Image (tube, coloured by chain):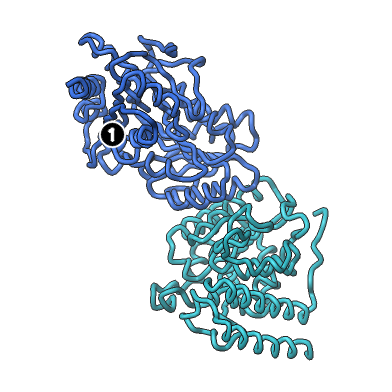
Chain colours: A cyan, B blue
Amino acid sequence: MSKKFPRVHDPKKLKLIANMIRRDVVDMLTEAKSGHSAGSIGLADIFTALYFNVLYHDPKDPDWEERDRLVLSNGHVCPVMYAALANAGYFPKEELLTLRKLGSRLQGHPHRGSLPGIENSSGPLAQGFSIAVGMAIVAKRERKRWRVYTVVSDGEQQEGQVWEAAMLASKYNLGNLTAIMDRNNIQIDGFTEEINPIEPIAAKYRAFGWNIIEVDGHNIKKLIDACNESKAVYERPTMIIAHTIPGKGIPFMEFLTEWHGKSPTKEQALEAHRILELDRREVEEE
Amino acid sequence: MAVPYNENPKEKKATRDGFGKALVEIGEADKNAWVLTADVSESTRTHWFAEKFPSRFVQVGIAEQNMAGAAAGIATCGKQAFISSFGAFSPGRNWEQIRVSICYNNVPVIIHASHTGITVGPDGASHQMLEDIALMRTLPNMNVLVPSDMDQAKKATHLLYEQKMPGYMRTSREKIPTFTNEDTPMGLGSSNLFIEGDDVAILACGPMVWESLLAAKELKKEGISASVVDLYSVKPIDKEMIGKMAKKTGLIVTAEEHQVHGGMGSAVAEVLAQMKTDAVLKIHGINNRFCESGSAAELMAKYKLDSSGIAEVVKEEVKKFKS
């Protein structure tokens, strides 16, 4: 590794970054007037952990050969990824407000080639998971030092392709692959366990030969530890089941399936900012 | 000027063999060439590559969706990927993965579908892929080639490889006389005029090219002078040749082992409809139905896609055209 992105270790700083990402996502979705709020907001801590501590990457050199790859499979939560990329310095933050608009590099679902830092076009669920497996096969066969991280959703597990990919990752002993599942329990039509239960999800992946780590998806330090732990498991891919609260940090969104696929109104955005500002002050005072 | 071809070929070879041979050549020259297969490596001829370059071969098992996705992932790492299965499953089952993971990402993955068309024969309708050209040619960033014999399939594989973008090649299981040779041209958006005639132009692809060449001879005996064009490049398509044939003969008959909706014939119709011409077109293929088990020869005869069937269809069209 010839270069290294400065990692943030201070828990307070990491929390402030996650707070900033949440505010950005609220603004982006409010301005876009459409998009997926609950998942994006709920993933703020995971994306903070990834882009500000876990990943080897260089925002000023997005195509750096030796970078870790982050493959977003559930592309509909891309606002949180865009916000994380902008805060990490991949592109100007002002551009965040162009989300979903004509001529924007911030497509409604990510498009590879449009925006620096986007490894894959995604949206149709499960596709990113296979792409990540393909990348990890190359890295393993060619003894690359970079790793592949992929973020998947829980509802996504209902797609058959996920299990095709899970099986192949296990066949090739992809110890260089870390998947993080956003276990927020919701999907468009309701709760995952009512729509088509995915449980026992940990047992399923274990049966497929994966290493399983379960973690509080809002505890940034634990998320970082889980990613580091996955690096130490050489012969098996790891699935980090990150238990999250959809809309976490904005009480009127939390736990509600109705917030899966809609954006806040201007009034709701103001309320969200008021709450996030209180949170920020609390963190500052810690 | 017509392109020369061997009128009395001694050898018969399957087009899928051309793909397998080209893969080995590409694998030798390019260390970044990777091949993925979904269980049917021998049938699709990827086993030759697998034996020589095991470290660049990925056996995904019976999982065509994951094969397309993993190939896209491999291709994003600066690799050239090839995926191979029977047409009924790839692109039959994994169209959405081809659309987004391969085409929208715009990564160099070449999809080889073997065992397409009715010439798969005894396997029956579930395995007789007759809709793949329609599925593939509508995708942005995708090139579509349907080679007519083993040598052309080899060249088509190299040609798609050189584009460094998504590509689709359709081959068949049945052995076809190798009537072309190394000097027979092949280019993207091009075609080969093998026989020049004035009454009608037969535009064919895949196994129907050889059958059309034989049909033209039969027709000649009955006083009908037919042009025969190998329209192997379905996308991009040779508009100039189609225009030339329309002008020269005024009557075009397309022949393919594909549904008449959405295939090569439809691509020709799109060109003619947007051109200043009063040429008449007959799209000959499988007309909105599933077929059945039988030998390749029996099915080609039944659906009028062998030489005498094509000749019969052409004769009828010429008669209608002149009346």
Q: Residue at x 23, y 20 (%)?
A: B311
- The N terminus of chain B: image quadrant: top left
Q: Which residue is mark 1?
A: B118
Question: Is B185 situated left or right of A5 in this image?
Answer: left
Please name whichever residue, B27 or A41, is drawn nearer the observer in this view of the structure: A41
- The C terminus of chain B: image quadrant: top left
**Above or below: residue A262 compared with residue B227:** below
Query: Percent from the top left, x then y, of residue B303?
Result: 21, 30
**Above or below: residue B170 compared with residue A4:** above
How packed is label 1: few (under 14 Cα within 10 Å), some, or many (20 or more)?
many
Q: Residue at x 50, y 62 (%)?
A: A208
Question: Is B304 situated left or right of A225 in this image?
Answer: left
Q: Residue at x 22, y 32 (%)?
A: B294
Instruction: Judge whether residue B49 can be spotted in this image.
Output: yes
Amino acid type, callout 1: Ile
Q: How many marks?
A: 1
- The residue tagged with tag 1: helix, strand or loop? helix
Q: Residue at x 64, y 32 (%)?
A: B30
**Above or below: residue B226 compared with residue B274:** above
